Image (cartoon, rainbow, N blue to C red):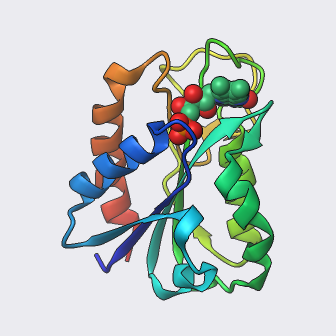
Amino acid sequence: MRHVGIVYGSSTGNTRDVSEKLYEVVGPENSDLLNVAEIDPHVLEEFDNLILAVSTWGRGDLQDDWEAFFPQFDELNLSRINVAVVALGDQRNYPANFADALAVLVDKAAERGANIVGKTDPEGYTFDASAAVREGRFLGLVLDEDTQSSLTEARIREWVEQLKRQFV
Ligand SMILES: Cc1cc2nc3c(=O)[nH]c(=O)nc-3n(C[C@H](O)[C@H](O)[C@H](O)COP(=O)(O)O)c2cc1C
């Protein structure tokens, strides 16, 4: 597997913490960990594989730093890049918009030409509606640090095994 860029935006630290865990599991020798609030957007084009990590705010909106970054996607060509998105949400308090931010980033990355990988099974989560589900699958990985944090490490480990098969 070639180098992986892990790019996160986090308001209260949860997405930062899970991104640090991802970095540890992918392996620091294989990856770079970057805060979206601090990067030149074109850095994303330098990777063969990207993990974009976001939390969901408002009612299904992107976390603020990703929101600020979002218009700059339109300058990027992601056409040879494998992109996997992980989104955080809270299924108990936001059951009608659970982890919706996942879909916002996936759709934008796909529009910029990325090859989207890392879809997962929504079994084991309880919610009413989520834009992150399409054709019965989450468009990436969904983590819930508010109500299912004890499941996070296993979910990350399983997802990274999947990504090792899907990344170049
Ligand atoms: C004001 C507020 C709005 C939120 N809106 C949503 C939402 O619409 N959907 C969802 O799944 N989670 C929502 N959440 C939960 C956050 O996504 C969750 O707490 C996440 O772990 C925060 O990650 P961060 O600390 O990296 O920003 C919301 C949380 C707060 C405090």
Identify which residue, 17 or 147, lies in the foreground.
Answer: 17
- Quadrant position of the N terminus in the picture: bottom left
Task: Name the quadrant where ligand 1 sits.
Answer: top right
At 22% across and 54% down in the image, what residue appears?
A: 24
At 67% across and 37% down in the image, what residue appears?
A: 56
At 74% across and 55% down in the image, what residue appears?
A: 67
Identify which residue, 94 or 116, lies in the foreground.
Answer: 94
Q: Is residue 32 above or below residue 59?
A: below
| Residue 122 image offset from top left, x and y in percent | 55, 29
| Residue 98 image offset from top left, x and y in percent | 68, 27
**Residue 135 visible at all:** no
Compared across the picture, whether 6 is left or right of 139 comes to left
- Quadrant position of the C terminus in the picture: bottom left
Q: Is residue 55 above or below residue 8?
A: above
**Residue 127 visible at all:** yes
Compared across the picture, whether 85 is left or right of 101 comes to left
| Residue 43 image offset from top left, x and y in percent | 53, 83
| Residue 61 image offset from top left, x and y in percent | 77, 41
Q: Is residue 2 above or below residue 164?
A: below
